Structure formats: structure tokens, C-alpha cells
Amino acid sequence: MVVNIVTALRILAAITFAQIYQICVSGGLRGGGDTKWPLYSTIVGILGMRMILGYFFVVRFQWGIAGAWWCWFLDQVARAAIIYYRFRGGSGKR
């Protein structure tokens, strides 16, 4: 039990950076008028990463709570990457 908690906290520490980045930059894109790409990144993250990978990590691989946290980590990293490339491309500039 303690091993699962320690693992979850370590994954949470890694999630924090990607999550904060994607929240801030998504807000910048929305403020610049680009509301579609933050939506697309959310759909990819939640449906693709959390739902599909969550099933494999938790049920198939039997990683338990650590598998669920890894899915959350991959979700946030994928969303941050999508938002980064969209923002880097100059979207939102007037």
C-alpha cells in the first residue's frame, strides 16, 4: 500500500509541470480566439489517453492505481504537446 502511495506521489509531481503548462497556454490560445485546438487536445487526452490507455494499464496490465496515474500523466503530456505546437505555430496572433 505504501509503495502505491509513493509511486502515485512521484507521478503526481511529474504531472504538475505538464498540467500547469497546458492550462496556461490553452488559456492564451482561447484568449487569442483559437478555441478549437484546446478542445481537440482535451478530446485526445481524455478519450485517447485516459479511457483507452486506462483500460489497458489498469485492467489488462493490472497496474492498479499506478496505471491510472500513468494514464493521467500521459494525458497531460499529450495535451501539453498539442497545445505547445499549436501555440508555437503562431496561432492567436493578430
Image (cartoon, rainbow, N blue to C red):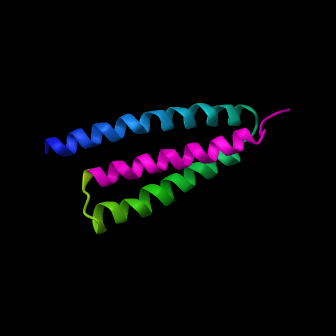
- Residue drawn at (56%, 37%) of the image: 22
Where is the N terminus found, in terms of image quarters? top left
Q: Position of residue 64 (x, y in %)?
A: 24, 56
What residue is shown at x 25% (from left), y 63% (from top)?
A: 62
Name the spot of residue 29 as percent of width and height, x first: 70, 36
* Part of the protein shown in magenta: 66-94
Magenta region, mostly helix, strand or loop? Answer: helix
Counting every numbered tag in the picture gives: 0
Q: Is residue 93 left or right of residue 63?
A: right
Q: Residue at x 36, y 65 (%)?
A: 56
x then y, percent, for residue 21: 55, 33
Image-quadrant location for residue 51: bottom left
- Outermost residue on the bottom side: it is 60
Q: Residue at x 59, y 30 (%)?
A: 24
**Could you tell whether 29 is left or right of 42 in the image?**
right
Indicate the quadrant containing the C terminus: top left, top right, bottom left or bottom right. Answer: top right
In the rendered structure, the answer to whether residue 22 lies left or right of residue 14 reads right
Q: Position of residue 80 (x, y in %)?
A: 57, 42
Tell which residue pokes out farthest to the left in this image: 1
Nearer-the-camera pick, 31 or 55: 55
Q: Is residue 50 above or below residue 34?
A: below
